[in-house]
Every structure is written in C-alpha cells, then in structure tokens.
Amino acid sequence: MSSQLETLFRLQEIDLGLLEKLREIESYEGLLAKRRKAMEACNGRIQELTGTRKQLVNERAIAERQVLERQDLLRQKRQRLQKVRTDRELRASEGEVHSLIEEIETAEEQLLELMARVEELEAKISTERAEYSDLEQADHRHVNEDAERIEQLRRDLADAKGGRDGVAAELEAPVRKRYDLIHQRRGGLAVVKVKDGCCAGCHMRVPPQTLIEIMKTAAVRLCPSCQRILFVSQPE
C-alpha cells in the first residue's frame, strides 16, 4: 500500500480526533451558556415580578388610605347624626351613612384582593430567588472545572493540529486538496474502510475491479456512490 493512502488514513484518524475535541469543547461551552441563560431568564422573571409587586404595594397603600379616610368620615357622619333635629335631615344623614358604609365595604374588598395578590407575588418571587440561588451555586461549582477542561481541550487541540499539519505535509498537493474537499463535504469523514466488499461510509457495494486496483497498486480511489476515499486494510 502506498504511503499516500496510508497517510490519508492517518490524517483521517487525526481529523476525527480533532472533531471529537471540538465537539467536546462545544458541549462544555453549551452547558456554560445554558446555565448563564437560565440564570438570566430567572433574574428577568424576578425583576418583572418585583416591579409588579412594587406597583401593587403602592396600590395597596392607596387603598388602605382610602379605607381609613372613609372610616374616619363615617365616624364623623355618625357623630353628626346624633345632632340631627329634623326628620328630613335624619333621612339624609342616614342615607349618607349607608352609602359610605357600602363604599367602605367595596374598598375593603379591593384592599383584601390587593393584599392577596401581593402575597401571591411575594411567594413567586421567593420561589424564583431560590431557583436563582440554586442555579448560581451550580454555576459556581462547575464554572472553574468546566473552564479548566475547555482550556485543556484547546491545548490538546492545538497540539493535535500541529501533528496534523506534519502528516498533511506528506501528501501530494492534488491528493491533499481532494481529501480536504471531501472532508468538508462529508462532515469530516473523507476516508472509509471497505468491509465485506462494501463502502463503510454509504454501505454500497464497491466494484470488484476497484478493490483489485486498490489492493494491487494502493491507488487512491473513490467510492462510486458517496465519493469518499476508499481504504483497504486487508485483502477482501
């Protein structure tokens, strides 16, 4: 077997290792990004809930003040009712008192509703803050470990690329160009073995004449179906 075909197979193994490291780096970076995104989303919900709570607390304070003002006014009305001299004034005052009592009841119902909504929001804020704390602690636990792993993978990747360049330099320019083109088009898998007379890339039958030519001359030949470079490790 010619050194060119052997070199292509070695280069393929190196490239597959590089691809695996790249995917591992992407996986770690994806996990980091996912945790940060979850933290940002959780913090956004907290800010939104906190803003809504602030608004409702202001409305609750206004409602409380209105209830107190009406209750104070009711006391005044009742005090004046005791000083009424005529039936006409009595009926008018009683009507004012009755109307004011209804207003107070309505205002108290609104106040209770606002208080319940504030309590509900506070419970949600507490839950979101607990979730944010858990996310933050998880991020702190893993961020240094993940960052170190990513850095180590990048160093390994740089070393492997250096070795790849040395192997690739052994190839003739046309062969290397063809390999690089197939490598890009086939998702990193440019060289495939022939197993039981079939291409391991597309599982299609390889013509016997092509197999014989590869075994006898170690020529660089492509699979007629998927156009990958065929590698025969032993006589078929």
Image: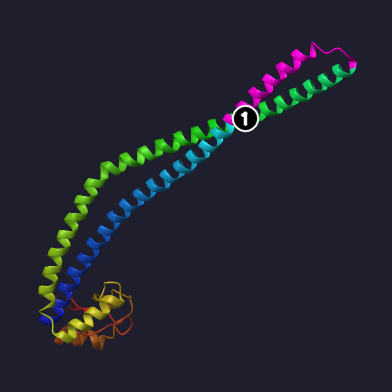
- Is residue 219 visible to the viewer in this orientation of the structure? no
Q: Position of residue 134 (x, y in %)?
A: 36, 38
Residue at the spot of label 1: 63
Where 58 sits versus 37, above or below? above
Dot 1: element: helix
Q: Is residue 30 above or below residue 1?
A: above
Residue 175 left/right relative to 166: right
Q: Nearer the viewer, residue 207 or 87?
A: 87
- Residue 25 on image: x %, y %: 25, 58
The coloring applied to the image is rainbow
Residue in the picture at 81% in, 19% down:
93
* Quarter in which the C terminus is drawn: bottom left
Residue 88: in magenta span = no
Q: Give the residue type that dot 1 points to.
A: Ala
Determine if residue 58 is in view.
Answer: yes
Residue 22: image location, x then y, percent: 24, 62
Foreground residue among 182 and 135: 135
Q: Which image quadrant for residue 88?
A: top right
Which region is colored magenta? Answer: 61-87
User: Looking at the image, which residue sits at the far right?
Assistant: 87
Q: How many marks?
A: 1
Classify residue 75 as left or right of residue 174. right
Q: Is residue 163 left or right of residue 202?
A: left
Question: Residue 29 at x, y = what percent?
Answer: 29, 55
Q: In the rendered image of this protein, does residue 25 appear above or below residue 4?
A: above
